[in-house]
C-alpha cells in the first residue's frame, strides 16, 4: 500500500503532541508523549522523530520521511494513531 504522508500532516501532529503531551526525555533529547506516541526533534531542528515503541518515523530534511516499520500493517496502525491525535486535539 502506498502511503501519502505529507510534511504538513506530520508537523501538525508534532505540534499537537508538543502542546498537549507530557514532557519526556528521549534518545534525541527533550520530547513529548501523548496517547502512546513520543516525539522529539533533532539537535538542529531539521528532523522530527515519531515513535510508538513499535514503529519509528522520521521526517527529515527536504520533507522526506522514512520509517522502520517491519510491515505495512504496523505502519498503517501507526498512521491511524497519528490521525487520531490530529483529530482529537486542537
Image (cartoon, rainbow, N blue to C red):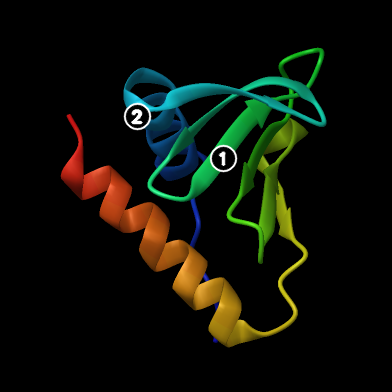
The residue that appears at 64% across and 28% down in the rendered structure is: 40
Residue beneath label 1, please?
A: 38
Q: Secondary structure at mark 2?
A: helix
Question: How many marks can you see?
Answer: 2
The residue that appears at 71% across and 72% down in the rendered structure is: 69
x and y percent of residue 63 in the render? Answer: 65, 38
Q: Quadrant of residue 58?
A: top right
The answer to whether 25 appears left or right of 75 in the picture is right
The residue that appears at 34% across and 29% down in the rendered structure is: 16
The answer to whether 4 appears left or right of 49 in the picture is left
The residue that appears at 49% across and 76% down in the rendered structure is: 76
Q: Secondary structure at mark 1?
A: strand
x and y percent of residue 55 in the render? Answer: 66, 63
Q: Quadrant of residue 46?
A: top right
Query: Between marks 1 and 2, how big is the CA–CA gap?
Result: 11 Å
In the rendered view, would you say 12 is above or below 66? above
Residue beneath label 2, please?
A: 16
The answer to whether 77 appears left or right of 67 in the picture is left
x and y percent of residue 35 in the render? Answer: 38, 47
Q: Which mark is residue 64?
A: none
Mark 1: give few (<14), some (14-19) or many (20+) Cα within 10 Å. Answer: many
In the rendered view, would you say 52 is above or below 14? below
Amino acid at each position: 500500500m502506498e502511503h501519502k504522508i505529507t510534511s504538513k500532516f506530520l508537523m501538525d501532529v508534532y505540534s499537537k503532541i508538543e502542546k498537549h503531551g507530557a514532557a519526556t526525555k528521549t534518545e534525541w533529547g527533550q520530547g513529548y508523549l501523548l496517547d502512546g506516541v513520543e516525539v522529539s526533534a533533532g539537535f538542529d531542528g531539521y528532523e522530527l522523530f515519531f515513535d510508538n515503541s513499535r514503529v519509528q518515523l522520521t521526517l527529515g530534511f527536504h520533507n522526506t520521511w522514512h520509517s522502520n516499520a517491519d510491515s505495512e500493517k504496523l505502519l498503517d496502525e501507526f498512521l491511524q494513531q497519528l490521525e487520531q491525535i490530529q483529530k482529537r486535539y486542537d
